[in-house]
Image (tube, rainbow, N blue to C red):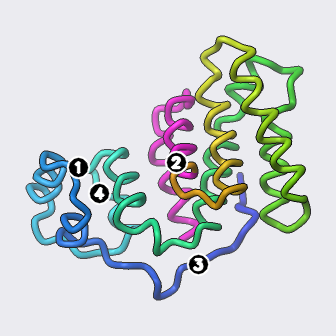
Amino acid sequence: MYTSILALTLGETMKKITNKLIKSHNPCEDRLDNFNKHYPKYSDTLSNFFKLDKITYNDKMWVIKHAVGKTIDIKILQQWSIDCAEFIVDNYNDAYPNDNTLNNCIKMSKKYLLGECSLDKLKKAKLATYSIIHSINSIAHPAIYSIADAAHSIVYSDMNSAIRSALYAIDSAECLDQENINLSLLIALL
């Protein structure tokens, strides 16, 4: 159905996710207690961590942001955020079929990652995407934010924007399984 435009791997740079690693980043006590209760001696890859069923999607995003984010190549997170945003863009397209702003932003983001578009063109597409947020009052806002944050993550090499993009994709999704889809997209890139 969809093939990522980048073929990126982490190789040996990926840390094992362990109870100690998570604790070292000072999570909320109740979330750490939940993890330790269900997985008291956990030590495995990030990909397998994503498959744990007793850890919330938000907790998994927290681990990316705080515990392993700096060990993941930013290009992987940027591509992931575009993948997540592209998956839900039709929510906006269905509401505004004559507006190609979001599709153009995704297109420019992908082209920039491939070296086929200037940073200036990507910034213009990102700004156009942000500008429509204020001109409409709609349930399509999460899709807009997802795409705008994906582009922002590329323009500024910002891990937090990539993660926000994936979170907004969940808010926009009409598919109940969007969390698993987003995690599968990231696992495929890892």
Q: Is residue 38 magenta?
A: no
Confirm or deny contact between disc 4 and disc 1 (CB under 8 A): yes
* Magenta highlight range: 162-190
Q: Is 11 left, or right, of 98 in this rendering?
A: left
Q: Is 150 left, or right, of 25 in this rendering?
A: right
User: Circle 2 sits in a helix, a strand or a loop, which is it?
Assistant: helix
Confirm or deny contact between disc 2 and disc 1 (CB under 8 A): no
Please state which of residues 178 and 27 is positioned toward the viewer in this rendering: 27
Pick whichever of labels 3 and 4 is earlier in the sequence.
Answer: 3
Q: CA distance from mark 2 to mark 1?
A: 17 Å
**Looking at the picture, how far across and down is residue 48, in whole percent?**
35, 67
Q: Which mark is residue 84?
A: none
* Residue at the spot of label 2: 181
* Residue at the spot of label 4: 52
Nearest-to-viewer mark from 3 and 2: 3
Q: Residue at x 46, y 75 (%)?
A: 71
Q: Residue at x 89, y 50 (%)?
A: 121
**Looking at the picture, how far across and down is residue 11, in whole percent?**
52, 85
Nearest-to-viewer mark from 1 and 3: 3
Q: Residues within 10 Å of mark 3 (few under 14, many from 20)?
A: some
* Residue at the spot of label 3: 9
Q: CA distance from mark 3 to mark 4?
A: 22 Å
Q: CA distance from mark 4 to mark 1?
A: 6 Å
Residue 39 in the image: above or below residue 21: above
Q: Amino acid at mark 3?
A: Thr
Q: Amino acid at mark 1?
A: Lys
Toward which corner of the image does residue 23 lie, by quadrant?
bottom left
* Residue at the spot of label 1: 54
User: Circle 3 sits in a helix, a strand or a loop, which is it?
Assistant: loop
